[in-house]
């Protein structure tokens, strides 16, 4: 009997210890697996560990361009009732349509109010994280999508001394670069989103920020004649891209600029983080400017973290969100990631010359959501549009692309009259 009681006592002790160990964990899910982005996440985790040293952080990452693979794994886990404690998700429709409306997320408005940070974020960013008056995620960063990065040495050689403000002017410089034996515009659309990324910046320019935003609000028709102009501009740009574009990922295209093989690359400002990681200095080796005709707009790509329903370690998830929302956390993460903080009161001295330029425009320009990165439209529409744009890159048939776009928009319930 004595040995039985002792055995039962030891068994209960092991169970209790296991529960303590389990309770002291925090699983963070993301697709930040490479270079500066992985280092940035580790810096954010380090801040968390500073305040909560007894919590074991499980850094669960899944590789794949723009999170394609990670999102598939995450969906499987959410649907299977096995959510992580918190996960990376783009602000906007990717968050709202995929996770909030189906009922997989817990509102966190009360936490932001409790921490006194509601007024520390731009209203437009919090609206992208909200549904029916409740906030569901906290933006840890902001990337700008409508940026051209260029090789300063090649630019000087072709006489591009000032950033071109119109597409006609930019195409003139692409032609000059081509005549000198360079690729004008580097493209890597092995993963479909990069071609759509290019197209959405053109669309933003031809419509302007108000009408671009109006597409997603049902105020502007997808039958607007300016959308044809966007396809016409992209068709011209395709005359200046590298022949092997379909075999390259986004960073491979950015590397063509670094290697002196291409003049420019239209990409989000994670490309700036990449160029710094390979040894280039912003303002010295490479320059940048807003995509032509989008100087008055800031295309937002924002990574956020929220609180899933049934998070295994809810208390630790809340602690994580508090760090994500803090100035200290955002200033640890963003300078390494090559993004700017979502908080308006961050320490600008911690950011390089490019990021300070981006911060200024973020605070003063019209904010617009990205299609390619899940903010503007539901996932089904984005997937269809990805296919339409990638077929267009191959066929360059404007009429067919427009017809397909109108059908997709009508199916989604957008304005097409």
Image (cartoon, rainbow, N blue to C red):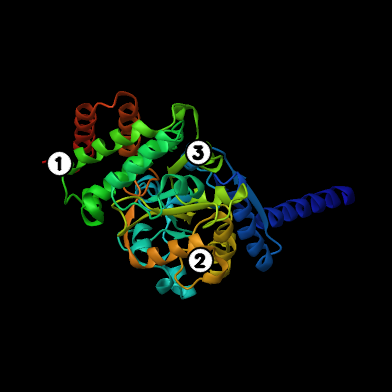
Q: Nearer the viewer, mark 2 or mark 1?
A: 1
Question: Which secondary structure lies at badge 2?
Answer: helix
Q: Residue furthest left?
A: 417
Residue 82 placement (x, y as % from top left): 53, 43
Residue 343 placement (x, y as % from top left): 46, 68
Residue bearing mark 3: 65
Residue 309 placement (x, y as % from top left): 47, 53
Disc 2 and disc 1: Cα gap in Å? 42 Å
Q: Nearer the viewer, residue 22 or 17?
A: 22
Q: Nearer the viewer, residue 216 or 296?
A: 296
Question: Which secondary structure lies at badge 3?
Answer: helix
For the point 71% across and 55% down, the residue is: 21
Asked whether, in this view, residue 21 is left or right of residue 292, the answer is: right
Which quadrant is home to the C terminus? top left
Disc 1 and disc 3: Cα gap in Å? 32 Å
Q: Residue furthest right?
A: 2
Q: Is residue 157 above or below residue 401?
A: below
Answer few, some or many: residues within 10 Å of disc 1's Cα (few below 14, many 20 plus, some between 14 and 19).
Answer: few
Kindly indicate whether the residue at mark 3 contacts the one at mark 1 (C-beta within 8 angstroms). Answer: no
Q: Nearer the viewer, mark 3 or mark 2?
A: 3
Mark 1 or mark 3: name the one nearer the start of the chain.
Answer: 3
For the point 22% across and 50% down, the residue is: 207
Q: Which mark is residue 397?
A: none
Residue 284 showing in the rendered view: yes
Answer few, some or many: residues within 10 Å of disc 2's Cα (few below 14, many 20 plus, some between 14 and 19).
Answer: many
Residue bearing mark 2: 325
Kindly indicate whether the residue at mark 2 contacts the one at mark 3 (C-beta within 8 angstroms). Answer: no
Mark 3 or mark 2: name the one nearer the start of the chain.
Answer: 3
Mark 2 or mark 1: name the one nearer the start of the chain.
Answer: 1
Residue 309 showing in the rendered view: no
Question: Which secondary structure lies at badge 1?
Answer: helix
Residue bearing mark 1: 225
């Amino acid at each position: 009997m004595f040995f039985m009681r002792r055995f039962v006592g030891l068994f209960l002790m092991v169970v209790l210890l296991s529960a303590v160990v389990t309770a002291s964990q925090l699983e963070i899910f993301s697709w930040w697996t490479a270079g500066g982005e992985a280092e940035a996440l580790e810096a954010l985790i380090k801040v968390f560990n500073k305040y909560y040293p007894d919590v074991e952080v499980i850094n669960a990452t899944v590789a794949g361009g723009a999170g394609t693979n990670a999102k598939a794994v995450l969906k499987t886990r959410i649907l299977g009732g096995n959510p992580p404690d918190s996960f990376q998700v783009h602000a906007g429709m990717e968050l709202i349509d995929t996770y909030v409306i189906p009922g997989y997320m817990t509102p966190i408005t009360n936490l932001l109010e409790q921490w006194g940070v509601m007024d520390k974020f731009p209203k437009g960013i919090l609206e992208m994280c909200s549904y029916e008056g409740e906030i569901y995620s906290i933006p840890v960063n902001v990337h700008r999508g409508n940026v051209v990065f260029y090789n300063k040495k090649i630019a000087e050689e072709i006489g591009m001394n000032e950033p071109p403000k119109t597409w006609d002017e930019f195409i003139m410089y692409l032609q000059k670069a081509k005549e000198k034996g360079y690729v004008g515009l580097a493209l890597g659309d092995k993963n479909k989103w990069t071609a759509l990324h290019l197209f959405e910046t053109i669309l933003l320019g031809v419509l302007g920020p108000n009408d671009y935003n109006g597409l997603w609000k049902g105020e502007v028709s997808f039958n607007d004649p300016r959308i044809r102009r966007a396809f016409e501009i992209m068709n011209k740009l395709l005359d200046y891209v590298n022949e092997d574009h379909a075999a390259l990922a986004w960073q491979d295209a950015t590397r063509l600029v670094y290697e002196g093989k291409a003049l420019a690359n239209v990409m989000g400002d994670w490309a700036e983080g990449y160029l710094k990681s390979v040894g280039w200095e912003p303002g010295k080796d490479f320059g940048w400017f807003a995509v032509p005709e989008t100087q008055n707009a800031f295309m937002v790509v924002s990574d956020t973290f929220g609180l899933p329903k049934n998070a295994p370690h809810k208390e630790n998830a809340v602690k994580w969100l508090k760090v994500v929302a803090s100035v200290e956390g955002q200033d640890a993460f963003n300078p390494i990631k090559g993004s700017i903080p979502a908080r308006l009161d961050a320490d600008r001295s911690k950011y390089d010359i490019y990021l300070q330029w981006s911060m200024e425009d973020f605070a003063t320009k019209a904010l617009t959501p990205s299609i390619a990165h899940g903010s503007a439209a539901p996932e089904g529409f984005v997937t269809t549009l990805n296919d339409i744009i990638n077929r267009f890159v191959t066929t360059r048939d404007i009429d067919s692309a427009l017809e397909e776009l109108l059908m997709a928009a009508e199916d989604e319930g957008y304005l097409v009259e």
